[in-house]
Amino acid sequence: MRGSPFDLRERTDAVRSREISSILDGERAIQGRRVVVFLAPGSGRVAAIASKRIGGAVQRNRARRVLRAAWAEVGPLAGRRDAVLVARAAIDGASSRELVDEMTALVTGTARR
């Protein structure tokens, strides 16, 4: 079914893997307790990464889902920049509200060091 929201060929809001690599290599990491944010000039796309350190498939999928949900609120603060969000082990059990607060502080530069 073409045009379906589940048709991955039609998605243009995701950052492609080679673009993720270049963002991770070339940009400065903004590190938080639960998430690391990489921002690069772009069109406002986002990629969420959760490694096996986060846990099994269920925990990794939840971490990516919560990261994307939180970024939906925080993204406009970052302007038209592409973002790569990397989950840290402390994300386990975090709510999207907690991540919104943390990412807002990271993106606006008001995070406590």
Image (cartoon, rainbow, N blue to C red):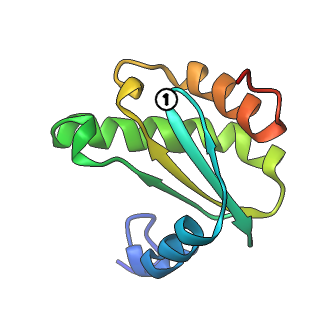
Left or right, 101 with reference to 19: right
| Up/down of 24 relative to 101, above or below | below
The residue closer to the viewer here, 71 or 102, is 102
Q: Position of residue 52 (x, y in %)?
A: 21, 46
**Residue, x 48% and y 76% (percent of image)?**
16
Hey, which quadrant is residue 82 in on the image? Answer: bottom right
Q: Position of residue 22 (x, y in %)?
A: 55, 76
| Up/down of 68 relative to 6, above or below | above
Give the residue at mark 1: 34
Q: Position of residue 41 (x, y in %)?
A: 77, 70
Count numbered badges in the picture. Answer: 1
The residue closer to the viewer here, 11 or 83, is 83
Left or right, 51 with reference to 106: left
| Up/down of 96 relative to 72, above or below | above
Q: What is the quadrant of the C terminus in the image? A: top right
Q: Is residue 70 visible?
A: yes
Q: Is residue 15 visible?
A: no
Identified by mark 1, the residue type is: Arg
Q: Position of residue 36 (x, y in %)?
A: 54, 43
**Residue, x 84% and y 56% (percent of image)?**
79
Q: What is the quadrant of the N terminus in the image? A: bottom left
Label 1 packing within 10 angstroms: few (<14), some (14-19), many (20+): some
The residue closer to the viewer here, 38 or 3, is 38
Left or right, 94 with reference to 31: left
The residue closer to the viewer here, 87 or 73, is 87
